[in-house]
Each structure stands twice: as C-alpha cells, then as structure tokens.
Amino acid sequence: MKITKVEPFTLHIPLGRTVADSFNQTDRVGMTGVRLHTDEGHIGNGFTTTLGSGDDLIRSAIERYYAPILMGRDPSYVKKLWHELYWSSLHWIGRQGITTMAMAAVDIALWDLVAKDAQKPLWRILGGAKEKKIKMYNTDGGWLNKSLDDMISHMKQLIDQGWSAVKMKVGKPNPREDYERVRSVRKAIGDKIDLMLDVNQTWDLNTAMVWGKRFEEFQINWLEEPLHPEDIRSHRILARELNIPIALGEHIYTRQAFRDYLVQEAVEIIQVDVTRVGGVTEWMQVADLAECFNCPVIPHTADAGQVHQHLVAATPGSPLQEYVAVERGVFTEPVDVREGWLHIPETPGASTDFTPGAFEKYRVA
C-alpha cells in the first residue's frame, strides 16, 4: 500500500450554541486535517481541532512540509514516518503547538489506514483492554457563560438521562462567585454524582491554594488546569497541599513534558489529547508512561471522542472518557453514547470518516 495523494482540509462546524470557559468563547469548532489516499483505494482521515483560528497555519504545515515526506510511502511504517515528520525542517522552528497538531492529524490518518487495511477497528490493532463499553462524563452542562439556573437545569437533565459524572467550568473574575456556583450545583445534583472543576489555566498559585482548599468540602473528583501549563513548580506545590487531585494535559504537547510532570509529582490525572500531543503514536507512549506511575489517563477529547474511544478501549489505566456534543451528522459513525456509557465500535478504522454532506457543507479550505 502506497500513499498517492495528500489532501489537507479545514472544516468549520457550528456548535449550535455559544460555549465559554475562563478565557475562550466560541460558537464553532475548526477541524483541520488530512485525507491520505492510497493505491489500494483506502482513504485515511485524521484531524486536529481549533476554535476557528490558526487553521491555515496547521494546514500549511501539512501541505508544504509533511506532504512531501508522505507521498509514495507505505503507511504501515507509521512510527518511522512519525519520526521523520518530527525531525523534519519544521523541528527547527517549533516542537509543540502548530507543528505537533499538524503531526497529530497526519498520524491519526496513518493509523486509520493501518486499521482499515487490516479490516479492524483501531482499538483491536492497539490491543483491547476493555469490553463493550466505557464510562463517560459530560462537560456540556457546565459552561461558564451559563447562568446558575440554566446550568443546574442542564445538569439535572443530564442526570435524568443516566449520566453519573459531570464537569463544570470555574474561573470567574471573583472566585467567590465560583464558590457559590459550585456549592449550588453540588446541592442540586446530590453527593452521589461525580463533579469535576475546570479552571482553564487562569488562576495564579495563591488563588489556587486558597480556593482549591475551599472547594474540598464539595467532594470534587479533580481540579483541572488550575495554573499555566508550563509551570510545573506551582503545580507540584498545589498537588502537595490540596486533597483534590490535579488534572492536566490539554495544553501539553510532548511526552517529555508529561514525563517531567510525573517525575516531579505535579499531576495526578493525565489528560493527554491525541489531537494535540502528536497523534496516536505519542498518545500511547504517554499512556504507558502514566501507567508506570500508577497515574490514570482520562483524556481531553477535542476530537469529540472519535479517536479517543479507541485509545481508551486499548488502555488499562484509562477509566473514563470525556463527552462534549458536536452536531450530529458530521461523522459517518459518531460515538455511540447511551445513559452515560460509550459503546465501543467494531467498524474498521479510527472512526474519523466524515459524512460526504458534512464535509462539503462545512469545508472552508
């Protein structure tokens, strides 16, 4: 099997609602990626995600720098190709962010081809660790731009649908408002529902120390991205002082950075994202590394869970997966979620095929 065409693309998909955390707000998601065509008729699809800006830079990296490396190559040598992409000429100007997100799209497409060629779902290629289904938690009810009444109403709807774990955003300019929102949500949903908090990086260490302690009374499962993602020292101090586990990884782009967090005991839940870290190849290395430290992997799912369902299904130390809804009809086989559980797919590939209608409707480049 040889790659005969490298087709970069960008889709802008409306969310049908405006969502906000402590420093982002959007009503759409950008999906920039690549279709790898082969001489055997298979097409591998891979993508990364944005909030609709920077897509042109990611697409340009794929088209101008990675495509020449891929043309005519056998996608079965996916790890060799990952190594060549990493040490390409772009290595000089960037080893995280745009370059690793572009690599992620390519690497996912390569693994999609490997699985399709074998006529197996990706999780079977990687080695299954779970049977039939994966427990999920829902992020969609807890956006920071929701009023308290709307958020509580949405959370209750999710619980009525069978969800047993939900996440809410914090990071208001006045942390006292966060405290009241968390207190009210916990009272409304009861003590049997898992509740997680996501700061999205906007606190300093003093704020995190003071208010993290206050939140302990609400039985919080984890405190997510409380500080700047490169500040390992402050995360280490916070992890030692709080009884709430520290979770992060959404904005960490390399296995070496995850290693440093683990070695310095600055993280307790790894949230590595396949669309950011450089694809399936490096995601699995991070997951193996985390297992050496007995640290659970609960990924951030910027891919709407499409690829991550395969990775979680293949990872013994990954007990839970995130769910954020995207418009139905985008993927040919969207994640199958029922009553808070994801049912693992059996269709060959990485579940990254777009429906023809959605691809044409939302394609902007």
Image (spheres, helix red, strand yellow):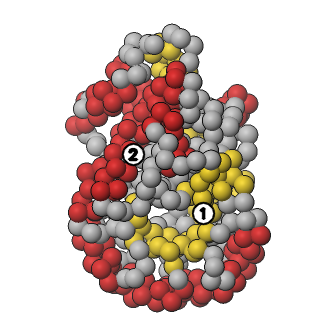
On-image quarter of the N terminus: top left
Residue 234: % across, % down: 28, 74
Q: Which mark is residue 361?
A: none
Q: Residue at x 24, y 59 (%)?
A: 260
Residue furthest to the top: 39
Residue 100, picture quadrant:
top left
What amino acid is labelled 1 in the image?
Tyr
- Pointer 2: residues within 10 angstroms few (<14), some, or many (20+)? many
What residue is pinned by disc 1? 137
Q: Residue at x 27, y 73 (%)?
A: 236
Residue 248 shows in this picture: no
Residue 183: % across, % down: 60, 87
Eyeballing the image, is 269 above or below 173?
above
Pick the front one: 139 or 310: 310
Eyeballing the image, is 117 above or below 171?
above
Eyeballing the image, is 105 above or below 339?
above
Residue 30: % across, % down: 56, 44
Residue 45: % across, % down: 54, 30
Q: Residue at x 25, y 36 (%)?
A: 91
Give the secondary structure at mark 2: helix
Residue 222 shows in this picture: yes
Q: Which mark is residue 283?
A: 2
Residues at marks 1 and 2, CA–CA distance in whole angstroms = 20 Å
Residue 25, picture quadrant:
bottom right
What amino acid is labelled 2 in the image?
Trp
Q: Residue at x 67, y 60 (%)?
A: 340
Give the secondary structure at mark 1: strand
On-image quarter of the C terminus: top right
